[in-house]
């Protein structure tokens, strides 16, 4: 691809790293938003992913940090059967006590920093500024 676009392979590698890290940061923020959002603010109700049984990083972290009783809860909640309001309330409590959402956001910021580092060697200008602002937007949309 670098040859066809007449670009240096290092530029292609830097952009690939940028894109990969941006994508991971964006997804991690999306995963965290599921537990701190509301439909009016973010267009996504709290717990949509949870109710759909999606195993995301906040759930993985809360499960890993939980007691055996809490792990049983997570296994049952993620088993594919419909989760109700009581299950969501308990999930939110466990996510809070385990700091899983905060740690997911911190990981997203780390991947955002990696994306910015990937393009550190690019010359300044509107294109680089736009790439950096894209990362900043992807991270800030959770707050």
Image (tube, helix red, strand yellow):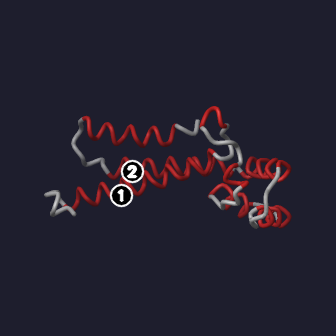
Q: Residue at x 67, y 59 (%)?
A: 61
Front-lying residue, 43 or 32: 43
Q: Position of residue 126 (x, y in %)?
A: 26, 35
Q: Residue at x 77, y 67 (%)?
A: 75
Write down the residue under mark 2.
Answer: 115
Classify the position of the N terminus by image quarter. bottom left
Q: Is residue 123 above or below residue 84?
A: above
Front-lying residue, 61 or 3: 3
Q: Residue at x 42, y 55 (%)?
A: 21
Write down the residue under mark 1.
Answer: 17
Q: Position of residue 135 (x, y in %)?
A: 42, 43
Residue 130 disc label: none
Q: Residue at x 73, y 62 (%)?
A: 63
Secondary structure state at the residue bearing disc 1: helix
Say few, some or many: other residues with alpha carbon within 10 Å of mark 2 (under 14 / 14 to 19 / 20 or more): many
Q: Is residue 14 left or right of residue 108?
A: left
Of all residues shown, which one is farthest toward the front?
82
Disc 2 to disc 1, C-alpha distance: 7 Å
Q: Is residue 79 left or right of residue 119?
A: right
Of all residues shown, which one is farthest toward the left?
6
Q: Is residue 118 above or below residue 133?
A: below
Q: Are marks 2 and 1 in contact (CB under 8 Å)?
A: yes
């Amino acid at each position: 691809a670098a040859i066809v676009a007449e670009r240096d392979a290092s530029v292609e590698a830097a952009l690939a790293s940028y894109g990969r890290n941006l994508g991971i940061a964006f997804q991690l923020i999306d995963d965290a938003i599921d537990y701190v959002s509301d439909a009016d603010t973010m267009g996504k109700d709290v717990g949509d992913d949870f109710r759909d049984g999606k195993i995301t990083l906040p759930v993985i972290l809360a499960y890993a940090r939980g007691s055996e009783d809490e792990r049983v809860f997570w296994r049952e909640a993620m088993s594919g059967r419909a989760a109700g309001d009581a299950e969501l309330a308990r999930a939110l409590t466990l996510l809070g006590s385990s700091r899983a959402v905060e740690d997911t956001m911190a990981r997203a910021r780390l991947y955002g920093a990696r994306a910015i580092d990937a393009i550190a060697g690019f010359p300044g200008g509107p294109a680089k500024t736009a790439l950096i602002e894209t990362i900043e937007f992807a991270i800030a949309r959770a707050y």
